[in-house]
Amino acid sequence: MNLPYTEEHELFRKQVRRFCEQELLPHADEWERDELFPSWVIKRAGELGILGAHFPEEVGGGGGDYWFSIAKAEELPRCGSGGVVMGLLLQSDMATPCIQELGTPEQKAEFLEPALRGERIAALGVSEPGAGSDVAAMRTTARREGGDYVINGSKTFITSGTRADFITLVLKTDPDAGHRGISIVLVPTDAKGFTVGKKLPKMGNLASDTAELFFEDVRVPARNLLGREGMGFVYLMQNFQSERLISCASCVAGAFLALERSLEWGRQRVAFGKPLLQREVWRHKLAELYTKAEAAQALTYRAAAAFNTDRYVRRGPVSFETTKLVAMSKLYVGDAASEIADQVVQFHGGMGYLEELWVARYYRDHRLFRIAGGTSEVMKYMIAKLSGW
């Protein structure tokens, strides 16, 4: 594939790599034990221009195309912690793109610009205890009272939820209208009636905080509505494409990194008189895994090229064909990465099962990919529907 990476893209890639290897990786084990990375990480990423490289210059971004975000996502796994990767991508590619697409100049100045500088931490509030993949089943509501919205309900599985300064909150402004009653409102977390429930313990991505949130008569100005009332479902489906695609790029890069480190292990680990890498069974298995990683990357790059054309060249909505490519990427990358993670553990034997090696963390962190941002089952449904079946 003829990729559009320029010298500028590669310089940016090197900057992200330096940030990860020099400033983040030395602390990865500590943050995993603490089950939280410090907020200065987001602030520092903002200072370096990493968060906003693909946002317009008028909101404090770098003015680059979507390939800057892909390059960033491919380097972030070098920080050694899936939780840190998740927190940074949430800030730059999940909770904030819809503010750029839909926000007023005042909303961008209040929420987006400080988020890209890393000065205000963002969270995306979608999932609820009874509404995960079935977004239309959400029950959090906002009723209009004069010049305000009054919000009631709860959210769960919210990344950065314990420390977010604002929530890009998806809710129902018309509870009886199904998905046509969904809207998006920007909610500062210092608003009266907002509370954080417990921090949720997880299998992996330990360094990122995941929380349940509660809204009890939370009053925010009606001017905090993003876009048009009742269009939130459409906006969210568009926003999901960025979330899913950037996660694919990061997941594939993490898989390649795991395979590279496994090759080093295979050259050094001797069993029955030979390094593991000289054993035909493992040479063949690693060849298969590398092939799947290459295929996953190629599909992700094809989807990224289509997304970049839709949003940065045509400056329009994501097309159905691009949406299908993103769903195909997420489905295939999820399956390929899961197989790679499982076989990497097997390749390392008993050492792969111990917490003292990087392998166990990699295995735990990557399991979420087939769930978050739309399960693999939902991706299959979307592919079939968008194919006209």
Image (cartoon, rainbow, N blue to C red):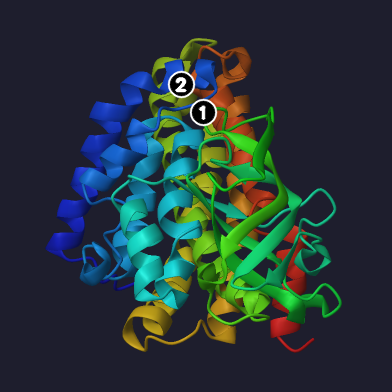
Q: Work out which quarter of the rendered image holds the N terminus and state it.
A: bottom left
Q: Name the amino acid, label 2.
A: Trp
Identify the mark at residue 31; answer none if there is no mark. 2
Q: Work out which quarter of the rendered image holds the C terminus and state it.
A: bottom right
Question: Which of the pair 142/305 is nearer the observer?
Answer: 142
Q: Is residue 35 above or below residue 168?
A: above
Rendering coords of residue 180 (x, y %): 75, 81
Residue 13 seen in the current view: yes
- Secondary-structure class at tag 2: helix
Drawn side of residue 194 relative to residue 306, left or right: right
Res 131 → quadrant: bottom right
Q: Residue, x 67% and y 75% (percent of image)? A: 233
Rendering coords of residue 140 (x, y %): 76, 59
Q: Are marks 1 and 2 in contact (CB under 8 Å)?
A: yes
Crowding at dot 2, Cα within 10 Å, few <14 / some 14-19 / many 20+, comes out as many
Q: Which residue is mark 1?
A: 207
Residue 327 seen in the current view: no
Q: Residue, x 36% and y 67% (percent of image)? A: 108
Q: Residue, x 54% and y 86% (percent of image)? A: 319
Question: Which of the pair 171/381 is nearer the observer?
Answer: 171
Res 132 → quadrant: bottom right
- The residues bearing labels 1 and 2 have C-alpha atoms spaced at a distance of 5 Å
Crowding at dot 1, Cα within 10 Å, few <14 / some 14-19 / many 20+, comes out as many
